[in-house]
Amino acid sequence: MTQPASPARPVTEKSPPADGAPSPWRSLLARVDVRTLSLLGVLAVLVVIGGVTEPDAFLDTDNLQLILTQASVIGVVTVGMTFVIISGGIDLSVGAIVALASVWATTVATQEYGFAGILFTAVVVGLGCGLVNGLLIAYGGMVPFIATLAMLASGRGLALEITDGKTQMVTVDGVLKLGERDSYVLGIPPLVLVLAAVTVVGWLLLNRTTFGRRSVAVGGNAEAARLAGIDVRRQRLYLYLLSGLCCGIAAFLLIILSGSGQNTNGNLYELDAIAAAIIGGTLLSGGRGTITGSVLGVLIFTTITNIFALNNLETAVQQIAKGAIIVAAVLVQRRTATA
């Protein structure tokens, strides 16, 4: 007579993993963002190259602060651009919005209202431009490329009209002091602290809120998102408002950095922001992207520019290097997508 089969022994946390089951270490590695680690590795290599080629100049504290400060303005713009691209859109007008917001916020009439007036005007102009883009794209049915291209042309033209081609100097002490060393917090410039704050808020918004999940869903498949109950048009409007808000904040940072407003501000910011987002792993087709990766992309480009400048390399060489990096990043994305 056969014995009845004994019940299976329950698997506890101390039990060895079954054959084929992933080990705890393998599961941990699977959760690590390989692209982020790669970007950090590239940034570390650039730091080494800069330290070897120009050790005294590159590793100087003032130069490192300069790199972070220069990255702050375009970094804030890139955070907004990342959200737009994740949703399957594009914004070619960010540079023009920065220029328009900076000159509108530095007119004589605006500066009469002091620090608050300049900040308020820069943010409101950015939001206003983002609202126009969002309405044209979400409710007007215009292609994002065309709508934002029109905003680019209009924004640049209006900025030129306001300034008459002249530089508008800032005379408000509260704004100018933020660009001085006395305003640094533990050796960190205020602009860098603003970038850090925007990055943290952007990361939380993308990864820990319904807004972020809806943005990814719209970029992945807009029709499926609509059928799931997401108001796709309203979501796109919000995203372009967010991009405009980031441009307004960036314009204020640029005013602090340069102490002036110019119609040429933000030149080619749209290309730099798109490139940084792509380097950071954001798909141009939408549906995937990371705030951390985009900001690391900004730091990589800013560090490359700084190294080239210290080594007296021509601007043309810098542009060629940036173009090569963008092509390489897109090729890597395609290989990853088809793997």
Image (cartoon, rainbow, N blue to C red):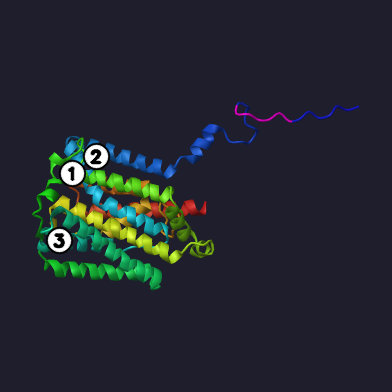
Marker disc for residue 50: 2
- Separation of disc 1 and disc 3 at Cα? 26 Å
Secondary structure at badge 2 equals: helix
For the record, the magenta segment spans: 8-13
Where's residue 25, x and y in %? 52, 32
- Residue visible at 35% across and 71% down? 136
First in sequence, mark 1 or 3: give its number: 3
| Mark 1, other Cα within 10 Å: few <14 / some 14–19 / many ≥20 | some
First in sequence, mark 1 or 2: give its number: 2
- Separation of disc 3 and disc 2 at Cα? 32 Å
Amino acid at pointer 2: Gly
| Mark 3, other Cα within 10 Å: few <14 / some 14–19 / many ≥20 | many
- Separation of disc 1 and disc 2 at Cα? 9 Å
Where's residue 272, x and y in %? 29, 55
Q: Nearer the viewer, mark 3 or mark 2?
A: 3
Marker disc for residue 310: 1
Q: Is residue 2 above or below residue 53?
A: above
Residue 229 forms part of the magenta stretch? no
Question: Majority secondary structure of the magenta segment?
Answer: loop
Q: Quadrant of residue 326?
A: bottom left
Marker disc for residue 234: none
Q: Nearer the viewer, mark 1 or mark 3?
A: 3
Amino acid at pointer 1: Leu
First in sequence, mark 3 or 2: give its number: 2
In contact (CB < 8 Å): disc 1 and disc 2: yes
Name the residue tied to disc 3: 262
Amino acid at pointer 3: Gln
